[in-house]
Image (spheres, rainbow, N blue to C red):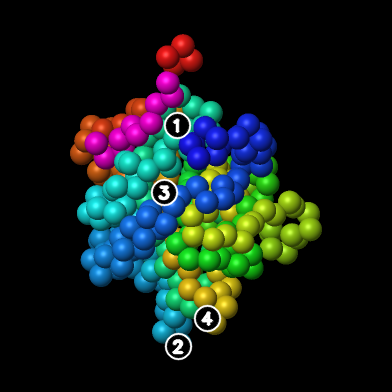
Amino acid sequence: MGVAELVTDDLVAAYSRDGAVCLRQAFGPEWIAKLAAGIERNIAEPSDRGRFWDRDAVGRTTFYDSQSWLHTREYRDFALRSDMAEIAGRLMEVEAVNFFFDAVFVRSAGTQFRTPFHQDEPYWSVEGFDTCSAWMPLVPVERASTLEFVAGSHRWTQKLVREDFGALTGDDRDRVEFDDDVVPFPDIEGHRDDYEVLGWAMEPGDVVVFNARIVQGGSGNLAPDRELKVFNTQWLGDDVRVLFRPEGMDPDNSAVMTEVGLSSGDRIGTDLYPQVWRREPANA
């Protein structure tokens, strides 16, 4: 099935309305095997951004790394050669898509560390509505352990306070300052019935694509015999501009962006954030 058939009009409408959709069997076993091999290589050879979070009393951990496509060839192949950029572009209804970065999450079997509800884009070194993430588990995921989303929250206009993840992970690299003039983050967990919370049980090959401004969290509470391996990619569309946020960024790309000549207000680009897909003209 081609991307045009996979990304139906109904899915595009649901993505616009809800901010998150699940595409079933978007990627075949060859991509799953390739990315699984890449994760093993990544854990053995982490970047300087790699770390283990939440090592508990019995040794269960959550491994995280990002922007490892620069040295992990399997990730690079997926970013530049898979259908993911076109899927993102068609769902966002944009003219062109640039790859932003990858993020890897590997949770040991039985890990209970659960990511609090938050938004992604307010942490990034860019700003724009045309942003999305693709959450792609490489192992089966139960509904109780999946990533969850508050439907429609990508269109909320309030500027919500950001979670200080450094306080959760114990790593200063995850710390951000709190903004002035922001709205307290709603207690989603304490008032779940007040929101439409989306989430899907998933199999390898499935992918959830979500707007980076949507309120999302979870992907913990693993059963004793279940681990979780997720390859996540981030994609940028037409209205995105570089933004160096004074209150902090995670990941903070300001140094590498500056080195390649990018500054706040610029369109994204260069070899670090390559344009991977462009929509063909209607009369082509």
Q: Residue at x 62, y 38 (%)?
A: 11
Q: Quadrant of residue 276?
A: top left
Q: Which mark is residue 233?
A: 3
Q: Kindly report the distance in space between the C-alpha atoms of the residues bearing marks 1 and 3.
A: 14 Å
Does the rendering let one see residue 204?
A: yes
Residue type indicated by callout 3: Thr
Residue 2, horizontal then vertical, whole percent: 48, 36
User: Which span is picked out in magenta?
Assistant: 271-280
Instruction: Give the overall secondary structure of the magenta segment.
Output: loop
Residue found at the far front of this picture: 1
Residue 61, horizontal then vertical, whole percent: 42, 76
Q: What residue is shown with label 2? A: 58
Q: Point out the frontmost of discs 2 and 3.
A: 3
Task: Mark 2: give few (<14), some (14-19) or many (20+) Cα within 10 Å.
Answer: few
Q: What residue is shown with label 1? A: 237
Between 145 and 140, the residue placed more toward the observer is: 140
Residue found at the far top of this picture: 283
Residue 123 forms part of the magenta stretch: no
In this rendering, the count of numbered labels is 4
Residue type indicated by callout 4: Asp
Task: Mark 3: give few (<14), some (14-19) or many (20+) Cα within 10 Å.
Answer: many
Between 82 and 248, the residue placed more toward the observer is: 82
Q: Secondary structure at mark 1?
A: loop
Q: What residue is shown with label 4? A: 225
Residue type indicated by callout 1: Gly
Q: Secondary structure at mark 4?
A: loop
Q: Which mark is residue 76?
A: none
Task: Mark 4: give few (<14), some (14-19) or many (20+) Cα within 10 Å.
Answer: few
Q: Secondary structure at mark 2?
A: loop
Q: Kindly report the distance in space between the C-alpha atoms of the residues bearing marks 4 and 1.
A: 39 Å
Q: Is residue 213 left or right of residue 78?
A: right
Q: Are marks 1 and 3 in contact (CB under 8 Å)?
A: no
